[in-house]
Amino acid sequence: MSIEFEVSRGVARVTLNRPERMNAVDSASEAALAEIWDTIDRNPAIRCAVLTGTGRAFCAGADMKEEGPDGLAYWAGTGDHGFGGIALGGRPSIPVIARVNGLALGGGFEMVLGCDLVVASDTASFGLPEPRVGRLPLDAMVTLPRRIPRTLAMGMLLTGRRIDAAQALDYGLVNQVVPAAELDSAVDAWVEDVVACAPLSLKAIKRSVHDTTHLRASEARNFRLPSLAAALESRDAEEGVLAFREKRAPLWSGR
């Protein structure tokens, strides 16, 4: 199985499982990932997702050894949400944590950029080698200059150079870097903090950030999304205040 998908206690774990190809994504994997993100969004019991890879790589990007469509045809096949169904961010509606266990190159790095939180092993590295093989990092060309200073983004986009985990942390591309042996416990700590929050609040925050990043601050402040009202007028909003007053953990219903 090229993609492993399991759900336990409200947490979905999505694992790229092609270690012999450094978890490179082929057309079958692309389709499987798209379906997985749809499945996650259809299940209100899922509160958080973790994306990772097996072996020594997170994901080496598109599988260039695959026979079939390439170039613009392959890019068109990735759909509206970008590489892996997630590279352009905002999907799925719940928080997604990238557990970066090793190499994150090309589309693999683009998927990291599409995640909401990133925890990386100190052995991880990130890069966009597409121009070295005559390709284009199409999604990263859009997302990376919006995430880090233009000069740093262009340094990666125009050279294919890799940066290590420490540099990625310095650039602000990851939330935490830990020794490989501590990666799982670090990810679990982030998961625990995420699921402690109100589900509707998290969805509203993610949607609002994704949909207003291009706006000026004053415009973004007045941008009204249905998800904002749904969160503020929910039972969980009342429960959160009540739990605070009663000095107990809130019991979220997602309503």
Image: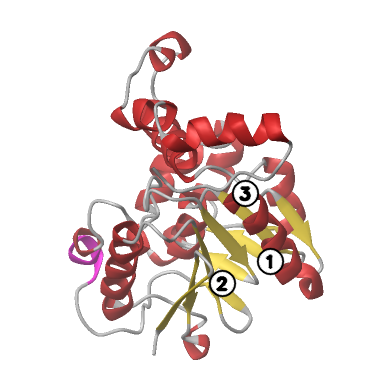
Give the x, y percent position of residue 21: 47, 85
Give me the C-alpha separation between circle 1 and circle 3. Answer: 28 Å
Give the x, y percent position of residue 210: 41, 35
Give the x, y percent position of residue 244: 68, 32
Q: Which residue is mark 2?
A: 58
Residues rendered magenta in the picture:
70-74
Residue in front for this viewpoint, 238 or 90: 238
**Residue sitting farthest toward the front:** 246
**Residue sitting farthest toward the top:** 218
Disc 2 crowd, CA 10 A, few/some/many (<14, 14-19, 20+): many
- Which dot marks residue 221? none
* Amino acid type for the residue under numbered disc 3: Ala
Task: Classify the position of the C terminus by image quarter.
Answer: top left
Contact, mark 1 vs mark 2 (Cβ under 8 Å): yes
Label 3: element kind:
loop
Does residue 145 appear left or right of residue 118 in this picture? left
Q: Residue at x 43, y 36 (%)?
A: 235
- Which dot marks residue 124? 1
Residue depth check, mark 1 versus mark 3: number of the one nearer the observer: 3
Residue in front for this viewpoint, 159 or 203: 203
